[in-house]
Image (cartoon, rainbow, N blue to C red):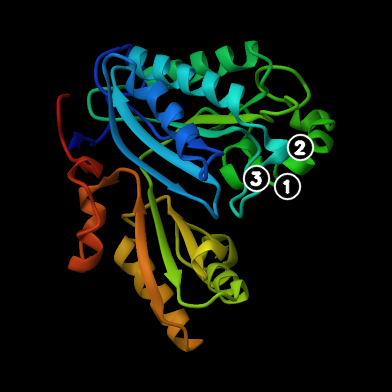
């Protein structure tokens, strides 16, 4: 378990404390490649791997690791170098949106680490990636423009439309060349608070239902506050999925989001076929969940409040 809680006061120059990184890699099918990607992180001294999750339909792997900022940045550079070398988006197809081989790299300051220290780490990594020919966009707290704060807006259109989008000066990258890398695409990195990635699988192979439910519950459509949701097909399992990011678990808890999906699915005569919590999650976000969902969690996924100041 890792301490979460409020970051140190803004503007502090602290380099102590813990930095969490939760990169999303565009590979979820090749076990040997995934092992090499994970090894690039675990071989870095001073970094602790907390969680890994991969899905062949998403064709995506999510990692979570933590340590001192310098060690976490080094691990992320190693991961990026391996992803840039091995993943070719021109041959990549998955149901989850993506614009990069290493698609999204969120940095999260935990207790004892200032927001500014996390921003320094994020921008150091971004400049490094840009120097290697991969365009970089900063999002959330690292965003250089208001329209780049929200991840879905930065990633809109995916890799397939990236070149045309980047031709617009308004979407010039923050780092790197003004055109996509031929195989690695682009990279999005930023600093954010802890969020909850929660997926609910539905016992139907018709994605129209998952998409309709996602539309009903997402904040952007007038649904639940702080909920971003997609409806996705899981063809390998004969299921569909409501894939959610809960950006403010105090406003909408996991239990509340789950109850709403159950309600919407039941109204359509569809059963729930399981749930997933991906990556670290604040302990307080687990309140009200039933034992079946809680049993899925590894202790290393739970972010504890408090910790060193």
Tell me if mark 3 has few (under 14), some (14-19) or many (20+) residues whose alpha carbon lies within 10 angstroms of its own.
Answer: few
Disc nearer the start of the sequence (3/2): 3
Residue 19 placement (x, y as % from top left): 32, 25
Q: Mark yes or no: residue 239 visible.
A: yes
Q: Which residue is mark 3?
A: 153
Q: Farthest residue in the front direction?
A: 32
Q: Residue tagged by mark 2?
A: 162
Secondary structure, mark 1, is: loop
Q: Nearer the viewer, residue 37 or 101?
A: 37
Where residue 247 sits: x, y (%)? Answer: 42, 50
- Quarter holding the C terminus? top left
Badge 2 or badge 1: first in the primary sequence: 1
Observer-nearest of 37 and 304 = 37
Is residue 159 shown left or right of residue 67?
right
Q: Which residue is mark 1?
A: 157
Q: Tell whether label 3 touches label 1 (CB within 8 Å).
A: no
Callout 2–callout 1 Cβ contact below 8 Å: yes
Q: Which image quadrant for residue 36?
A: top left
Within-10-Å neighbours for mark 2: few <14, some 14–19, many 20+: some
For the N terminus, give its image quadrant: top left
Is 303 above or below relative to 251?
above
Distance Cα–Cα, label 3 vs label 2: 12 Å
Can you give x and y, in whole percent of width and height, for residue 124 in the image? 50, 13
């Amino acid at each position: 378990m890792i301490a979460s809680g409020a970051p140190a006061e803004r503007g502090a120059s602290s380099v102590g404390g813990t930095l969490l990184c939760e990169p999303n890699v565009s590979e979820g099918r090749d076990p040997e490649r995934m092992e090499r990607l994970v090894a690039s992180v675990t071989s870095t001294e001073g970094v602790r791997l907390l969680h890994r999750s991969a899905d062949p339909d998403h064709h995506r792997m999510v990692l979570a690791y933590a340590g001192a900022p310098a060690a976490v940045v080094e691990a992320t550079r190693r991961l990026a170098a391996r992803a840039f070398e091995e993943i070719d988006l021109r041959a990549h197809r998955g149901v989850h949106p993506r614009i990069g081989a290493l698609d999204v790299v969120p940095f999260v300051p935990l207790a004892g680490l200032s927001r500014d220290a996390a921003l320094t780490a994020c921008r150091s990594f971004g400049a490094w990636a840009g120097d290697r020919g991969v365009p970089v966009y900063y999002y959330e707290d690292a965003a250089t423009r208001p329209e780049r704060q929200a991840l879905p807006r930065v990633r809109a259109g995916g890799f397939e439309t990236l070149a045309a989008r980047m031709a617009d000066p308004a979407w010039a990258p923050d780092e790197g060349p003004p055109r996509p890398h031929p195989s690695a695409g682009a990279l999005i990195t930023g600093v954010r608070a802890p969020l909850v990635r929660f997926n609910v699988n539905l016992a139907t192979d018709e994605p129209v239902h998952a998409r309709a439910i996602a539309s009903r519950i997402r904040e952007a459509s007038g649904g639940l506050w702080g909920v971003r949701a997609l409806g996705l097909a899981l063809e390998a399992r004969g299921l569909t999925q409501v894939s959610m990011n809960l950006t403010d678990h105090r406003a909408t808890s996991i239990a509340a989001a789950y109850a709403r999906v159950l309600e919407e699915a039941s109204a359509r005569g569809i059963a729930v076929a399981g749930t997933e919590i991906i990556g670290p999650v604040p302990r307080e976000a687990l309140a009200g969940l039933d034992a079946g969902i809680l049993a899925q969690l590894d202790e290393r996924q739970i972010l504890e409040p408090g910790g060193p100041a």
